[in-house]
Amino acid sequence: MVQTSVIGCGNMGSALIKGLWRAGNHTVIACDLDPDALESVADYVDRTTADVSEAADADVVVVAVKPDIVGAVLDDLDLSPEQTLLTIAAGVSTDYVEARTDANVVRIMPNLAAETGDMAAAVAGDDVPDEVLELLDDVGEFAEIDENQMDIATAVNGSGPAFVFYLIQAMAEAGVDGGLEADDAETLAAQTFKGAAETVLRSERSVDDLIDAVCSPNGTTIEGMEVLWDSEAKADVVEAVTAAEERSAEIAAEFNDE
């Protein structure tokens, strides 16, 4: 089993911990100064600690803290070149982290679906070891990208779940307006997104081809698609992603100016 420690047990750190627990291929140490945060993940790890130095005793050390305390955490971490430091903090460049550790540095932008094994993650690094790729594979899908693409990846898969939640809510509300019970409408809308996403990932057909496959001539789907094609829906989604990308770049600039 891969020895993994997670420093920072907030939303993302705890999601990753629970996903690794589900996979069953990792010995996990959870580290946080907040006793409540440690208590919330205690059932999913081998041990918990408030001591960063204890978390340093792992093959892969995950830093999942807020950007403004990354420097302080790195100052307390004494890692060797044989270890891998996996950083999740938004806006914190690989160069910043590499200057403060001897470990091999890999930067990732995951999302909260790691908890259920459905994470989408972007990963960047000069040397991404197999154990990190296996870790990411255990909790979802990933794409290896260049460091300079992290802002757009942050927008697409980091912020993206919120955009999808919004669309699920819209479809569910339409179902309720049509007479469905709220719980039933939410189940049908959410499962539809899940199934459609799996189809895109597993099919060799393009998204346009998949749309055509559902749109029978003179059928119900094409009637609805005509509304979407005539709307600004796609442009609005692009605008939302672009706004998130620009904010990611602003955060990085603010961090680097400090």
Image (spheres, helix red, strand yellow):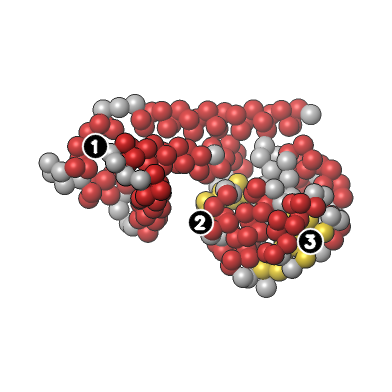
Residue 118: assigned label: 2
Q: Quadrant of the N terminus?
A: bottom right
Q: Percent x, y for residue 56?
A: 82, 59
Q: CA distance from mark 1 to mark 2?
A: 28 Å
Residue type marked 2: Asp
Three-letter amino acid code at disc 1? Answer: Gly
Q: Earlier in the sequence, mark 2 or mark 3?
A: 3
Residue at image coords 53%, 59%? 117
Res 195 quadrant in image: bottom left
Label ID, residue 48: 3
Residue depicted at x 42% and y 39%: 169
Which of the image's four quarters has the C terminus? top right
Is residue 25 found left or right of 29 in the rendered image?
A: left
Q: Secondary structure at mark 1?
A: helix
* Residue 39 versus residue 110 in the image, above or below: below
Mark 1 closeness class: few <14, some 14–19, many ≥20 residues within 10 Å: few
Q: Are marks 2 and 3 in contact (CB under 8 Å)?
A: no
Q: In the rendered image of this protein, does residue 90 appear above or below residue 232?
A: below
Element marked by disc 2: loop
- Viewer can see residue 194: yes
Residue on which the image places disc 1? 224
Q: Between residue 60 and residue 188, name the one nearer to us.
A: 188
What amino acid does circle 3 point to? Thr
